[in-house]
Image: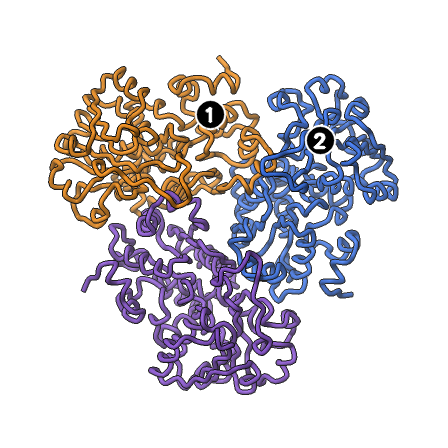
Chain colours: A purple, B orange, C blue
Amino acid sequence: MDLSLEEFVALDESAKAAYVGDCAILYAQQFDRPDLDAYCSLADICRALHKMPVGAEFMASLLPHRMALNFFVQPSSRTFMSFNAAQLMLGMKRMSVRDVAISSMSKGETLADSVRTFMSYVDCIVMRHPDEHAGDVAVWIAMHAMRTIHIGGEERPIPIISGGSGTKQHPTQSLLDIYTLEKSFEHVGGIDGKTIMLVGDLKRGRTVRSLSYLLKNYRDVRLLFAAPEIYQMEPDILEFCDRHHMPWEKLDSLDAGIARADAIYMTRIQDEWDGLAKGAHTKATDRFVFKAEHLDRMKDEAYLLHPLPKRDEVDPALDYTDDRRVVYWRQERNGMWMRVAILAQLFRVDQAIRDFAATQGIK
Amino acid sequence: MDLSLEEFVALDESAKAAYVGDCAILYAQQFDRPDLDAYCSLADICRALHKMPVGAEFMASLLPHRMALNFFVQPSSRTFMSFNAAQLMLGMKRMSVRDVAISSMSKGETLADSVRTFMSYVDCIVMRHPDEHAGDVAVWIAMHAMRTIHIGGEERPIPIISGGSGTKQHPTQSLLDIYTLEKSFEHVGGIDGKTIMLVGDLKRGRTVRSLSYLLKNYRDVRLLFAAPEIYQMEPDILEFCDRHHMPWEKLDSLDAGIARADAIYMTRIQDEWDGLAKGAHTKATDRFVFKAEHLDRMKDEAYLLHPLPKRDEVDPALDYTDDRRVVYWRQERNGMWMRVAILAQLFRVDQAIRDFAATQGIK
Amino acid sequence: MDLSLEEFVALDESAKAAYVGDCAILYAQQFDRPDLDAYCSLADICRALHKMPVGAEFMASLLPHRMALNFFVQPSSRTFMSFNAAQLMLGMKRMSVRDVAISSMSKGETLADSVRTFMSYVDCIVMRHPDEHAGDVAVWIAMHAMRTIHIGGEERPIPIISGGSGTKQHPTQSLLDIYTLEKSFEHVGGIDGKTIMLVGDLKRGRTVRSLSYLLKNYRDVRLLFAAPEIYQMEPDILEFCDRHHMPWEKLDSLDAGIARADAIYMTRIQDEWDGLAKGAHTKATDRFVFKAEHLDRMKDEAYLLHPLPKRDEVDPALDYTDDRRVVYWRQERNGMWMRVAILAQLFRVDQAIRDFAATQGIK
């Protein structure tokens, strides 16, 4: 069944996920448990392999003729840089567009034409764009464009990867969050059975939305939503949890959940959507701030995550703690390895990496 | 005979073309028919060679120690990206300057000093700059600078390539247009003898100006200029056509020429020169819009081109047509291959590419 | 002895230099005479080696797995481009951040968090930032961050290099200035014993400040400070000269020193700190302008330097002179070779370069 661009954009995300298949990374709904396990094990392997000079060299030999475009026309440090680093690790060539003012969009070109133009010259587009349907447009065009690329023995559409879309989704962030959780819980049975507290701006936090979608792939996960009422989680996610039998509770403070949570996932107030004056920022509500003293009340095997950037919602004293439960800086670096895994999988060099790693005693 | 910078800038373009010789790509007047044929055949060979892994690898081995600067301080998507892609294909290293505000020009440095500085560090400059004499300044400095580079057994000035100059010239675009026309007319005798209709904003369309200059190299070409009177072709080009015995007609609608044209070259209203409010654009005049129904009135062996970006002057329904006469997306991708050929020729690796291709059965 | 970030920032620069050791290039006070001699000889070797294809290839094989971040959020052409070129020569991979508006700093992230984030993904940061303590923050974080890199058999902090810090220091510029002076005075005993006249805006000229610090490493150097009173050298530098027994004089015109000076180091009025209207610039005072006729009054073995960019403080007629005493364009290119040497030394491939060069007959 084929769809026009308009028909495709009008679908709900699950239907879009089904239509797109493995041509793109746009919606957390695309992934099931085996996918997640495969991404996590591949990220682990890439990290271990890259530590060996022979492994780093092997990885850099995999995609030297592929060119990635990093099309980020909204602010980004971590996602942009970790994708760049991941591309370099796989030997890819890179271009970037970071400002529509220097592109032909400033001459009135449509997003569709611009994206199609990009596809004339590059083999992969990673994108963050203010239009919440930008990723939909890009993948539809990729699936209907004259130019395809040869990947793993097939002619395939040019891969599109979301680097964060409006307030809705940030699928690669949620994959690295899952990876961080799985590694943190490595010796206590993984994510299954855990209680995850999400704290802060859940309404506009695309990372917590995408993470909620992914967590339904694990058994007996319980979600605690700790947020000021105006920033509470949207009804569609609550319904999604219900439909997938994930118990959830709304909490009106971080304290209300800290003793029970196996993971505490802090988020920043996303006030970039509020049209504040330049440089002005909304202060985090005190009841949802993680303070140094909260460490004493966390479980021994609980972990503190944050997608970053952070502001005042986490005590900066924690930045240099040696408490092994504070993992957000490690989580940040995990992002790079997960993005290596994502690119490797999209370009079908994942098996080659696993095979080479096996010869080096890595599994 | 040597000239000061001021004397050089004051020359007419034909005299500049003669002075510059093959040190730069700045004016369409630099090229004669054998040049154009050589560029087209080289572009064809590069395209075929790059499809073979061994060919792509060979090409990437040619210029690994050369650094290109892409100095584009006006908006560009296609020209910028296709030059980047072309440089990568030849193994070149790249830097870019896309905003004078982040360069020393913001501290009051002259363009001449800035360009000379760039030449301290790079081996080639591709440039798009609002000053219509920027390319003149750059090539004159290259021809008088202390630093030269060793190319093909000679010490030569650092090559300068225009990526579009004001409303005057866009020589690499016109080379790719010629390439697209030649390929389209491959089985019907090439460009010789054809009628080419140029439509839209001919007054400020630097691509149609440069293309007109190149077309005098073909036999029996007839030009139709279809434009609203305020956007009609400038007298200097009409005189150029007369001087080179290229018959031309002004038309007051696209309809007036469609049945006769072998190629229809659409252009956008270049209203970036009109100082409109941000985001405002001038609507194309209906009589100069290409509509889907025009396909029925085109000749069987006629082709629809557009340098892109487009707006409302072409019906977007044509974007996904399978009518083989609509070639503007193919034309866009041709640009990359033509730019590979241009760089290869400037750095004198053209013969090496032809020789290697011959060993692979490509000619 | 360990220090908190606040304690470290509060130190004077000499104490900071001692604390930082060879983990960073931030303060001219870090270097003694053997360091300077080593940098100059290494820069010379790199330049000679790179001229040979086998040498260029060897150099590009040294650091292919290292990624540099060029974090320049103030205007820069020379420093930015020459570092990029130097990184490419050593085979390094590169990313750049040139605008805080496209980074997470626009979401309220602290500089400390941003820098720590960069350190998650890259192996070296070259930075120019408006905050005069930005380099201090970066090096302190590098010395306290979880992530270290393996260099020359040790786990070391991620190297930080200043690309110019506020009005205070520009250490790599002063290293290239020393290199240029040493090469200019090659046949007349080097810098020892010379009289150096610094002209222009000495108050806000970070290059003349850093250069003054370095010159104390040479014997019997005499400094002439020729500047309008409002731009005269700051008392801290005068005291530094006194402390290190470097005689100095204030002069109220360039003419007053020209007959005595072995080197004349011109500088631009740094009016970017004055909050002028966009495009407005302060005219240089006539008594401090180098005119073509001054060449006649310079010593035969004296040299004219300028860190560039220049404006009206040097007669543009000198740009194309063949007077071998006018060395500022050569000085500019020296910057690239010095930056190759700096990177090579920081990543401990300096000895490998010297060894390889020796096999090629270069010393």
Residue at the image position 57 percent from the left and 74 percent from the top: A285
Type of amino acid under label 2: Met
Crowding at dot 2, Cα within 10 Å, few <14 / some 14-19 / many 20+, comes out as many
Discs 2 and 1 carry the same chain letter: no
Q: Please give left or right for residue B75 compared with residue C246 in the image.
A: left
Q: Is residue B299 visible?
A: yes
Judge whether C219 appears above or below A180 on screen: above
Q: Is residue B41 visible?
A: no
User: What is the CA distance from the residue labelled 2 to the residue labelled 1?
Assistant: 29 Å
Residue in the foreground of this view, choosing between B362 and B241: B241
Task: Give me the chain letter of mark 2.
Answer: C
Instruction: Residue lying at the far top in this picture: please name it.
Output: B1
**Image spot of residue C249 (x, y percent):** 85, 32
Q: Which mark is residue B136?
A: 1
Q: Which residue is mark 2?
A: C266
Judge whether B321 appears above or below A2 on screen: above
Judge whether B31 appears above or below B121 on screen: above
Task: Give me the chain letter of mark 1.
Answer: B
- Asked whether the beta carbons under mark 2 and mark 1 sit within 8 Å of each other, the answer is no
Type of amino acid under label 1: Asp
Quadrant for residue C302, please give it. Answer: top right
**Image spot of residue C247 (x, y percent):** 87, 35
